[in-house]
Amino acid sequence: MKLKKNVFGLLAVVATLLFTAQAGAQETVIPKSELPQPAREFLQANFKEQKVIQVVKDVDYLVKTDYEVLLDNAMKLEFDGKGNWKEIDGNHNTIPEALIPEKIAAYVKQNFPTQAVNKIEKGTTKYEVELANDLDLEFTLDGDFLRIDD
């Protein structure tokens, strides 16, 4: 009986913590001018032909900040709190080749010559790349091919 009470007590604490974590996250629409300088410079250098439709600042309870930028061509970019890009999602549009690390671009061109890169995500340990045919590839941060992800 005591074990049941302890388990229920633990579940209540976990549920409370999860609810608090959700309540602590906050998304706010902000003007482009409030993006960190590196993100504004990245957009100007690589997407000056596109108009920024919306910028969302996402602050979670651990004081981690991310920014999501939606462009008028349906591309979505995600930046970390310092303004470094984390993800570029073309939404079925081709990612500009200049934004793809050289080694990764060369691998894709050699092994999938008819496919374009539609999405690239830079994580802490690897890049994830999605091709136009929905094939997902993984690379090290140095651009070395790891595997095809199912």
Image: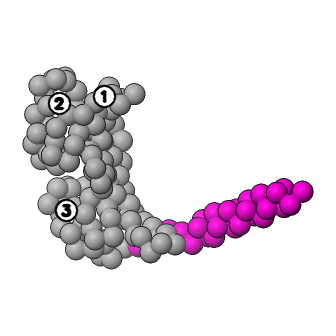
Q: Secondary structure at mark 3?
A: helix
Asked if the stretch drawn in magenta spans residue 88, the answer is: no
Looking at the image, which residue is at 31% across and 35% down? 130
Looking at the image, which residue is at 36% across and 41% down? 91
On the question of residue 114 being in view, the answer is yes
Q: Residues within 10 Å of mark 1 (few under 14, many from 20)?
A: few
Residue type, label 3: Phe
Q: Earlier in the sequence, mark 3 or mark 1?
A: 3
Looking at the image, which residue is at 42% across and 70% down? 64
Q: Secondary structure at mark 2?
A: helix
Magenta highlight: main SS: helix
In the image, which residues are magenta? 1-30
Asked if the stretch drawn in magenta spans residue 18, the answer is: yes
Residue tagged 3 = 42
Residue 78 vs residue 49, the one in the foreground: 78
Q: Residues within 10 Å of mark 3 (few under 14, many from 20)?
A: some
29 displayed left or right of 122:
right
Residue tagged 2 = 108
